[in-house]
Amino acid sequence: MDSVLGFTGDELIQLLKDFIGNQSPAFVRFMTAALPLAERRFCKAHDWSFLNKNGLTLTTVPGQPGTTTYTLNVASIGYVMKSTNVRTIYDPAKNLVLKKLTLDQIRRMDPDSNDGGTTSGLTHWAPGDDNSIVVYPPKFDTTALKIDGKITASNTTTTANYPVIPFDYQESFIEYLKWIALSRENDERADKQLLVSTALIKQDIADDLSMLGDTDQARVKSLNEQQTDGVSADLTALYNFWMFYSY
């Protein structure tokens, strides 16, 4: 186990083998196949902040014309990302954010695909199929774009990898995997295990939603506290003071 990344897929399967007491190859095959599906299902349970990645590099192939269609996968940006989950695409070198259009709009702007030139940068993009995007114009000199968006969990399709789920939330994921394993074994503890895993996942969702870094002075303040930032007067406190002494 890594103190930062947590458990690999192989380590998770070993934990389940020890928990269930089933060391058979058939059980290992089942859990190996179930692991990436469980990871995907866990990640669908909530809009987890750890799935949102910023500044992923997409190296384009410029030319006259260049390559305009790119699949958003591990080979291209380091993760798998659906085209509908892309938030922003920008070109740092040209100080430009690409405008999002539909593929139909790009086709109508340039039916013969000959726009752009030797010094043109990319200016627009559109979702293609499930995991691909199309950039415009077809003739361009841009070499690297940056992408902000939400990735799709796919790490444990290779069990030597760590799941995309961070260590802080892997306890509830392991409890969820235990439910899958118990269900496979027709174990009477499965129903109770589902309740345990669901409760832990809800706690992790609440933790992910807490956003403590975005909270200003989260403590409960006294009604008579007259300063909010150490300098300025708090008018609410003054109003409370006047109302209290007016009776």
Image (spheres, rainbow, N blue to C red):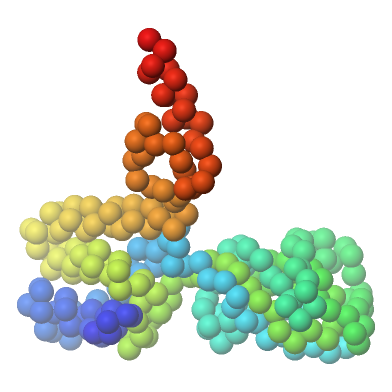
Q: Residue furthest top?
A: 247
Residue 72 percent location from the top left of the image? 60, 77
Q: Residue at x 74, y 62 (%)?
A: 100
Quadrant where the C terminus sits is top left
Q: Above or below — where is 236 with respect to 95?
A: above
- Specify whether 79 is left or right of 166: right
Residue 130 percent location from the top left of the image? 60, 68
Q: Is residue 66 visible?
A: no
Q: Residue at x 81, y 71 (%)?
A: 123
Q: Residue 126 falls in which quadrant of the image?
A: bottom right
Of residues 105 and 48, the one nearer the viewer is 48
- Specify whether 47 is left or right of 14: right
Q: Residue at x 34, y 36 (%)?
A: 222
Q: Residue 38 falls in which quadrant of the image?
A: bottom left
Q: Residue at x 62, y 82 (%)?
A: 57
Quadrant where the N terminus sits is bottom left
